[in-house]
Amino acid sequence: MALTRNDFPEGFLFGAATAAYQIEGARFGGCGSSHWDSFARTPGNVAGAEDGSLACDHYHHWEADLDLLKDGNFDAYRFSTSWARVLPEGRGKPNPEGLDFYDRLVDGILERGLKPFQTLYHWELPSALADLGGWENRDVAQWFGDFTEVIDARIGDRVARIATINEPWCVAWLSHFLGVHAPGKRDIRAATRAMHHVLLAHGTAVQRLRARGRDNLGVVLNFDFCDPASNAQEDWKAADLNDQIFNRWYIEGITRGAYPPELLGALAPHMPEGWQDDMGLISQELDWLGVNYYTRHIHAADPGAPWPATKQVEGHLPKTQSGWEIYPDGLYHFLMRAHEETGGLPIFVTENGMAWDDRIENGAVPDPEREAYIDRHLAAVRMALADGANVQGFFYWSLLDNYEWAEGYEKRFGLVHVDYETQVRTPKASYHHLARMLERR
Ligand code: GCO
């Protein structure tokens, strides 16, 4: 039996998510340069050396894109406001065109009866701040706080919910230890500092916004299920350490004001001085939590290797175009865990989705794999609801095919297909599937 709205609690919100750099087109409207522009322009970092300068040209197509949400019977839209578009130098003089753009966008969302869910940082750090050390520099927290106030003064009166940072693990570990995202560093000291400063920036933004009277504040964390490769104790330990690196550092920093002791022990020599004094600011009360969930990874001990001395082992579940195993149980697991860890805070699934090699066939885009992916993950949400988790909404990632960071434009996550030559949008079968499910009868 196909799911309907009635299978979810009254008021449960369904939405789709995007992010500024992935869709807008950074070359338009006086947007400043960000570390993603220079990272993409450096050979070897991004598939096809592609960047977000044009992307989906959402800067000019935003009205039609919002119509897609309305026509798809969605309730909410999660978008991000680009730091580099609002403050091209990262600090100082705002770009009036950028502020006007987000002002119109929020009005357009509201006019279509949708709730605006804003994300303040979805990764386009202004180059001028990257020059000063970016996330390695403690001052980033104040710079971010200042940016937060500038954009909030313009649109904060009309957004339903505000998230500070999108996926701190990606901002810190993926970008400063693994070197996969901008700024492409591979340095344990840089990573450790970014791990702390990204949460300090979160706390600073919450403090600044509280002072402005906001009561709709949260953060978006990404969770990855860490399974051991075998029953051997070393493999369990490897999975556990990866769980600390990927998941626990961020959620426990925010909810408990403490970092997991084993991981902290390993990183201690690289922690910024006086970090202990920041933990109160980092663990301020929040109004909601965003959970992003895509997949699991399988970990094994790698005794000869340097810390963390673990390696990933290939799993055997069906995979998406990104090579990610499809594992809906992980979503159930993290919703229950987030529920317990936050003491029952409202939770939104702020991202869940899959990439596939979608093609237009006779004007349509059949994507039964995505329909099944969505159904199975919504079933996991229903299980968590039945077991008491306070889940209040679900956002599919993403509304549109878009710039998938280091993967360029090849990986298609959208409910709506985008032809990057013509900018023509074609809703996929999964879009119609959701629209039917969300129809109000
Ligand atoms: C994310 C990112 C998205 C990615 C998506 C798929 O928050 O991880 O927000 O930008 O496109 O996760 O990898």
Image: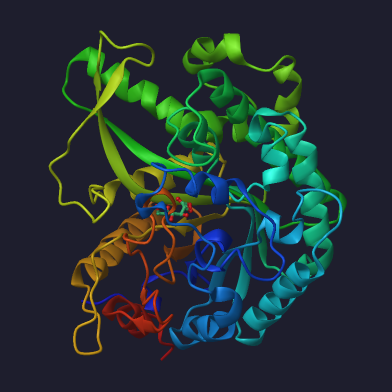
The answer to whether residue 49 is above or below residue 136 is below
Residue 343 sits in quarter:
top right
* Left or right for 146, reference 68: right
Position in image of residue 268 (x %, y %): 58, 11
Q: Going 24% across and 19% down the picture, which residue do you hit?
A: 235
Position in image of residue 320 (x %, y %): 23, 55
Report the coloring of the rendering: rainbow
Count of numbered circles on the image: 0
Q: Going 63% across and 16% down the picture, which residue do you hit?
A: 271
Q: Residue furthest left?
A: 316
* Left or right for 55, reference 309: right
Q: Quadrant of the C terminus?
A: bottom left
* Left or right for 367, reference 213: left
Q: Quadrant of the N terminus?
A: bottom left
Residue 168 sits in quarter:
top right
Q: Going 48% across and 78% down the picture, which residue do you hit?
A: 74
Q: Nearer the viewer, residue 115 or 133?
A: 133
Examine the rendering and report whether any part of residue 389 can be seen. no
Examine the rendering and report whether any part of residue 37 can be seen. yes
The answer to whether residue 162 is above or below residue 284 is below
Position in image of residue 437 (x %, y %): 34, 80
Position in image of residue 296 (x %, y %): 29, 41
Q: Nearer the viewer, residue 430 or 8?
A: 430
Q: Going 26% across and 23% down the picture, which residue do you hit?
A: 311
